[in-house]
Amino acid sequence: MIAVIPVSPLNSAKSRLSEFLTGEERKLLLMNMIMDVYNALEDLEVCLISKDDEILNFSKELGLIPLKERGKGLNNAIKQAINAVEDEEVIVVPADIPLIKKYHIKEVISKSKKNSIVISPSRGGGTNLLLLNPKDIIEPKYEGFSFLKHIDEAKKRNVEVIVYDSFLISIDVNTPEDLGEVFIHGEGTHTYKYLKSLGIEVLPKHSSAGRFIIKR
Amino acid sequence: MIAVIPVSPLNSAKSRLSEFLTGEERKLLLMNMIMDVYNALEDLEVCLISKDDEILNFSKELGLIPLKERGKGLNNAIKQAINAVEDEEVIVVPADIPLIKKYHIKEVISKSKKNSIVISPSRGGGTNLLLLNPKDIIEPKYEGFSFLKHIDEAKKRNVEVIVYDSFLISIDVNTPEDLGEVFIHGEGTHTYKYLKSLGIEVLPKHSSAGRFIIKR
């Protein structure tokens, strides 16, 4: 079993956070999130694939296996990584889910069996964790409603689908609102400490749904 | 063990959905969500507290125990219900989390022990499930960042906190975006069928985070 973390180039990273964070800060945010995701994966080998040399160097220093991305698009990056590694089973997780914990990975692995996928949703219909057992059991179909696409793929191929239901895994950090979730649920993470150090503050919005007001 | 569902008056129900749904439709949406939440709670007695006679009559017909709300505000409603019931342990869930499943309730109950709370977050820092064992172990502190408030309350009183991490429980339906989550994850629910019958359609937004475009 190996984990694969695909990472987009830094210059386009997290552009929806540009109201709150400079380019340099978004880069540091990404690095902090990579540390948190890597912590959750501590018992596994982890391969990080990216076009960006700075991210590759950073991940190498942390102890991840860096892989230079050659093709175009997220699905091709994941396929390249899956082909490059020797392991028979692969867990794919994005770099921007800093609330993921070690116990999630343990539980996900314990639920996995031959000829199955384990999948966790992101908000918005996406996929924030995908365990492929074996690694070529379905093709990665990220982007759009990838959660539904992955389940469809599995059904077409008679592959068992195990949904791993986690709020913490569902939170990918893309918008200022997402920073709010890190403030509520992220104590003890690198990402939380970094955002705190920037003087970011989070207040409840006065409404029954309680979304966030983010201040800096 | 009894479940308590507090419900706000119909005339203010789900006003952030008024772009998409008429007042009558929002009422029917609420009734469908109550049916889904009640399904998840099938092995328990369920008390629904509301000021609204139409909702109370509807819930009585379904088989819930209706309780006329007398005070003001969500926390007082919950306290009134907790005092009214004879059971020693109470699970509080809102009416607007139609993706909750029977297996969640089973797992939550199995994790509960004397002198503990089991809590599940909503997005935005709120609380979408709260099991109090026994029922007066902490005061309900809904509104604002109630997830943190409930944990603080428990710590102050030396009460064990068990966080039950569920994406499906975290989805409360308040905004058009939330309808998107019901379309992705709600197959088989009354709420999903009702929204489908209204001709609502959901498309992925073209962006890496994949939030929704909701059309009608």
Image (cartoon, coloured by chain):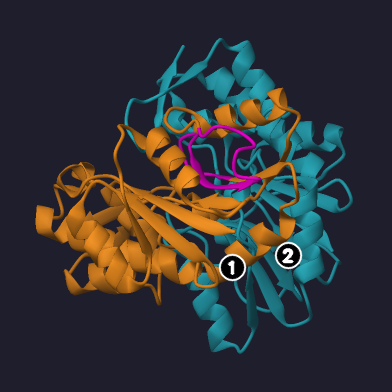
Chain colours: A cyan, B orange
Who's the residue at 59% across and 56% down the image?
A: A71
Who's the residue at 61% across and 16% down the image?
A: A196
* Near-viewer residue (B194 or B117): B117
Q: Where is residue A28, by image quadrant?
A: top right
What is the secondary structure assignment of the residue under circle 1? loop
Instruction: Tell me, yes or no, whether the highlighted magenta stretch contains residue B136.
Output: yes
Residue A33's x, y, as percent? Answer: 67, 34
Q: Amino acid at mark 2?
A: Ile
Q: Which residue is mark 1?
A: A140
Residue B34's x, y, as percent? Answer: 34, 62
Magenta span: B120-140
Q: Are marks 1 and 2 in contact (CB under 8 Å)?
A: yes
Give above or below for B42 relative to A160. above
- Using the image, tell me which numbered label, if any, was put on residue A82: 2
Q: Is residue B20 found left or right of A72 in the rendered image?
A: left
Q: Amino acid at mark 1?
A: Pro
Work out whether residue B138 can be spotted.
yes
